[in-house]
Each structure stands twice: as C-alpha cells, then as structure tokens.
Amino acid sequence: MGAKEKLLQVPDKLIRVEKDNFLSIMVLLAAKNRRLAADKSYKSSRGKTEASEFRENRWFERVVPTQISKAKGQQNMKKSILQEIQAAVIQYAKIIAHVIRVDVEIVDAGLVRIAGTGIYGRGINEDMSEEGFVYKHVLATGKPQYIEEPGRHELCGRCPKQGCCEEKLELCTPITLGEEIIGVIGMICFAEAQKNQIMQDLSFYQLFLTQIADFISAKAYERQDSKRNERMLEVLLQVINNVDNGVLVLDEAGKIIQINDSACKQLQLTADSIGKPVAMAATSDSLLGVEEYKVVIDNTTYFLIGSLLSVSSGLPSYDRIFIFNEIKNVKSGIYGLTKVDMPVTLDNLVGCSPATEQLKTKLTKLADSNSTVLIIGESGTGKEVVARAIHTVSNRSDKPFIGINCAAIPDMLLESELFGYVKGAFSGADPRGKIGKFELANKGVIFLDEIGDMPLYLQVKLLRVLQERKLVRIGSNQLISLDIRVIAATNKDLKELIKEKKFREDLYYRLNVIPIEVPPLRSRVEDIEPLVHSLIGKYSGLFSKKIRGIDRETMGILLQYNWPGNIRELENTIEFMINMADDSGWLTKDTLPRSFLDSRAGQPVPAEPAAVKTLRQVEQEHILQAVRRFGDTTQGKLAAARQLGIGIATLYRKLREIEETQ
Ligand SMILES: Nc1ncnc2c1ncn2[C@@H]1O[C@H](COP(=O)(O)OP(=O)(O)OP(=O)(O)O)[C@@H](O)[C@H]1O
C-alpha cells in the first residue's frame, strides 16, 4: 500500500482529533501533488542547490552556534513560540507518525525538542544542542534536508552516533513564521521498508512535511495574533481606566464586561456591576455634537451623551464600547466655563434703610420656598442682586443659578437659548445642538431678567413650561422634566403691558406668586452712605489705590442727587471718582464727573425728603436691624434682645407685630 493510500485511510479516531486540519492536509496535498506532477524539475533542482550550498559552507561552525545561543538566550527569558503551542505541535507529530508509520521529531529554534514520537517521545523538552546536527543545518540554511544514510553523512561528522546511527532515513524541513525560522520538523525511518517506501516518492513526502510545517506555522501565527490581541486589550484597559469619560464595555449579550472608575462614579455603580445587562437606545437627540442615549441599568434610567463604538474583530467577547458623560456632568462643565459670579449673600445687599431691612427679612422667609418670584423695580436698583441672594439663601444654593436677559437676545434666538435644540433642528443652528438655559438650570434657579420684553409667542411657550414643569428641546420629541425655581424680573409696568396686549395676563399671574418690589435709590436715601463706603472699598481694592475716604461736602452732594440710574449710576460715579482722586486719597467735589455737576440731568436734584417716621416705625426698623446683625436664630434673637435691653418674649411679640404690619 502506497503512502498516498495510507493518507486516505486515516483512522476515524485521528480524524476526530484533528479533523479540520487533517482534511485540509489532504486537500492541500492533492493540490500540491497535482502541481508537483506538472513541475518535473522540482526534485532535481532542489537537491542540486542544497548539495552545492552544503559543499561551499562550513555552516555549522559559523552560523548555527550564534543562532542557537541567541535563541537560547531568548528562551531563558521567555518561552519559544513553539513551546507556547506545544500541545498542538505534539498532536501534529502524533498524527503524522500514525498515518505514515514513521517517527517524528519537532524542535524549536533553540534546539529544544518540542514534540517527538517513538523513542523521541520520552525526551520532550530536552535540550538537543549537543546533537541534532541536521536540525542545526536546517535552522542555519532555512532549507529542507534529507539524509539517506544517517551516521555516515557529512552532516553527522560531529554527532556522537556517527557510524552507529540506527536511523535509516531522515527528512527535515524548517518551520517558518514570516521571515523567522522558528523550528524544524523531522521525519525519521528506523526500518528499511519504511525508507524504501519514502524514497520511492521522496518529493511527495518532502512536500507533505512542508505542509505540516505550514500548519504548525499557521498555529504559531494564530498564537502570536492572540498574544497581540491580549496586549492590545491590556493597553485598551489601561486607557479605559485613565480617561475622564465614563466607559462601559459590553459583550454581545449587552452585559457589562468592563466599567471604568469614571463610569462607576457618574452612574453611582460599583465594579460589581460587571455582568449586569444594559438596555441602551439613542434618543435621536444630539447635543454639543454628541448623541444622547437613554441607558437603563438595574431599573435606573440615565440620559448620557456619548459615542457607541462597535468593536471590530480581534477582541473576543468585546462587542460595543460606550464612551459617555452624564448630561448633568456636561452641564456642570458648561457652568464651570460660564459661571464667574460670586454668590451674593444677604450681607452683600448693602443698605440700612427700612426698605432694605424689610427686603432682607422677606428674602430670608422665602428661602426654602419653591414658589415663583417676580421682582419689580427700576433699572439698576439691584433686581439681579436680589435674585442671586434668593438663590444663595435657598436650599438650591449648591445647584445652578442661570440667568438670561430676555431683552438682550434677539427674539429669533431667545427660544433656542431658553429651550435648547437638537442636531439638525433648524437651518443656521449650531450643527452640534445646544442645551437650553432651562435645562442647564434644572434642579436650580432660572432668572428671567427683563421678562416684560419677552415676545408674545414665547410667553405662551413659557407659560406651558411653567405649568407643566416639562420642556421639549426644539427639533426633539422627548419630554424633559424640570425641577426648577423661577425668578423673573422687570422694570416695566406689566399691568400696563397687559392692557396694551403686550403681556399675557395668565403668564403675569403665574409669575407674580411672590412679588418683590425693589424701591429706587431716591426713596431709600439711608442706603446711599453705606453704599458709597462699600463701593469705595470695592474699587480702591480693584484699582489698588489707597483711598482714605470721601469728604462730608461731597457726600452731601451724593446724598442730594436724584440717581435716575440708581445703584448702577452710583457705582459708576464712585469708580470715576476713585480714578480721579489725587495723592491725598480723598474723594472730593473735584473728583465728581463734570456731567454730574454741569448737565441739566446731572444737576443735583433734591432727593425726595425722607418721610418723617413714626416712633413705632423707628422702633421696628431698629429691632429688625438688631435681628439682622445677630442672626435670625434663637441664639441670635437672644443676643439681639439683650442688646436692645428687652426680654426675649417682648422681642418675639414685637417681631410678630412687625410681621403683621408688613
Ligand atoms: N443692595 C446692593 N448692594 C450693593 N450693590 C448693589 C445693590 N443693589 C445693586 N447693586 C449693584 O448695582 C448694580 C446694578 O444691580 P442689578 O444689575 O442687580 O440691577 P437691576 O435692577 O437688575 O438692573 P437692570 O434692571 O438694568 O437689569 C450692580 O453692580 C450691583 O452689584
């Protein structure tokens, strides 16, 4: 029976072991055989080249020792690639031995026996550098070799078995991986009959061995590839753990297989979440150029904006990577960029007039309410300062305060500023989409300044948002729930605007839940002096200019002035005067703006004389001032009562009376 026939009669057991590979061997062998038959010159040319090369080179003295020692050096540090796939290599060796009835030996580039059958099976993992002369030659030349008379061949000259070798025939071929020779596979006959059988069809068996070497090489490549992937995975995991964005890696079933620290923090999950299923769907809104996704993990819904990437081949079980930021974190990033104002406390509301004292008391009372506030007052009286103070004293002080001036933004843009829009909402819009002020202010306070200037069509939309506490971004159909406190302000007479059909009455009543009137400066003259001193402190500090104070005459002029521009005008005047102050460090009449003294409008206009107060009013103001100074707490009131020289019960009674008269 010829060798080719034997190949076709592979036992079932062997086919089961290496069925795929073996079938491939057979297909390839058939193809190779056909090519071989066509190429009559193959056998002779191959043999000739090797023989002449061998004659010319004393190969084993020059090349092999260096190559082997290099491979051995590497081996000390790490396994050779053939050692890494040793189980498969042994399997190949066994299959060949069974099929062709020869012995098989496979060594790596460091001349370590990786696989062996028959007598060689006992010496697996042995160092063969003291023998294996034929293998050394193949490793050095990279060419197949056959030895017809082992022990007598020139290559066996240094072998200890020279002259008494039991082997009858040896066929060897290199195993290569790319440019590198990673080992040698040898087929050895111990019986004359085997030898004769192989010699009858030598080129076929040589080619067969080359095919097996190619399979081993393919296996080695596979291993190298999977090692590359493992390394890639390690790098990827390092990157994932070091980015600020949240990262979730999901498998094909949509379960978490990796979660980084940022994701744990943002989603308030722990590393135990690995294995949890994630339901994820794009909301079809795109904000700041990134898609928004609704993500559900453990019955908790998150709205996250980010990128969902499919993992291409190479990383088994890694299906999708989601790199994201929670929408509220994106928003706080925006606040971080835009919020420059210091919080305004009640102490920043400078003034000691009864109006200012009453205002402060009122603000303290509505601190923890969620009701909408409407602040009315002339321009520059401090409406925004009051709105900020409400935010600061409220239980939302750690949440955003987002202001928008409805008069300063063109009508066409106001809607998108207020409600935001998604990618592709309308032509001319930022193609990345935009988060609106309402959404930015969610959980905090929105301050709608100059509300009287809001166009009518937007008033309708605003009314709906205030009623339903929900909004829809322009171009989206997703409802966003709002938990927001609204403070609106205007210097216009809204009732007059309602009569003129410029302001919706229903909106007015929706806004005017808690009205706060900020009186003009001319009707709280007592505030001017403390304001002047506070502003001198502010601007002398800003300009690093030493200002000793303001003289009485100049202060008198300021007290007499009408202040049509209210506190803003007073502030500008003090800033100007500090700029004009000479080295004396005093703000005098000479430092006042010329227009302030010359122009008709600037002529000091006698301020409205402060109305003569009743003794009761004076007492009430005094009590409020004391409570403000010591604090609206039990301790503060005890201290205030002590300072006022009255008992605590009297103080409480008087405070009740004050409350009733307000
Ligand atoms: N009680 C106060 N104490 C100290 N500074 C104040 C006070 N009220 C207002 N200011 C200052 O006056 C200026 C004008 O205040 P603000 O902008 O709050 O006024 P407004 O009524 O909102 O003005 P507009 O109607 O023009 O929007 C600001 O610089 C503010 O800091």
Image (cartoon, helix red, strand yellow):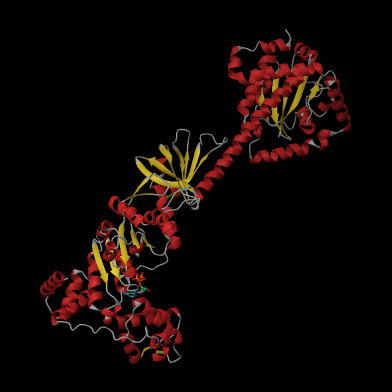
Q: Quadrant of residue 395?
A: bottom left
Q: Is residue 27 above or below residue 505?
A: above
Q: Residue furthest front?
A: 500
Is residue 166 in view?
A: no
* Residue 253 horizontal/vertical position (percent): 45, 33
Q: Is residue 329 left or right of residue 386?
A: right
Q: Is residue 67 above or below residue 632?
A: above
Foreground residue, 275 or 441? 441
* Residue 351 horizontal/vertical position (percent): 28, 78
* Residue 563 horizontal/vertical position (percent): 33, 80
Foreground residue, 558 or 321? 558
Q: Quadrant of the N terminus?
A: top right
Q: Quadrant of the C terminus?
A: bottom left
Q: Quadrant of residue 117?
A: top right
Q: Residue at x 38, y 82 (%)?
A: 536
Q: Residue at x 31, y 89 (%)?
A: 556
* Residue 240 horizontal/vertical position (percent): 51, 46
Q: Is residue 595 left or right of residue 656?
A: right
Q: Residue at x 38, y 53 (%)?
A: 439
Q: Quadrant of residue 503?
A: bottom left
Foreground residue, 485 or 180? 485
- Quarter of the image where ligand 1 sits: bottom left
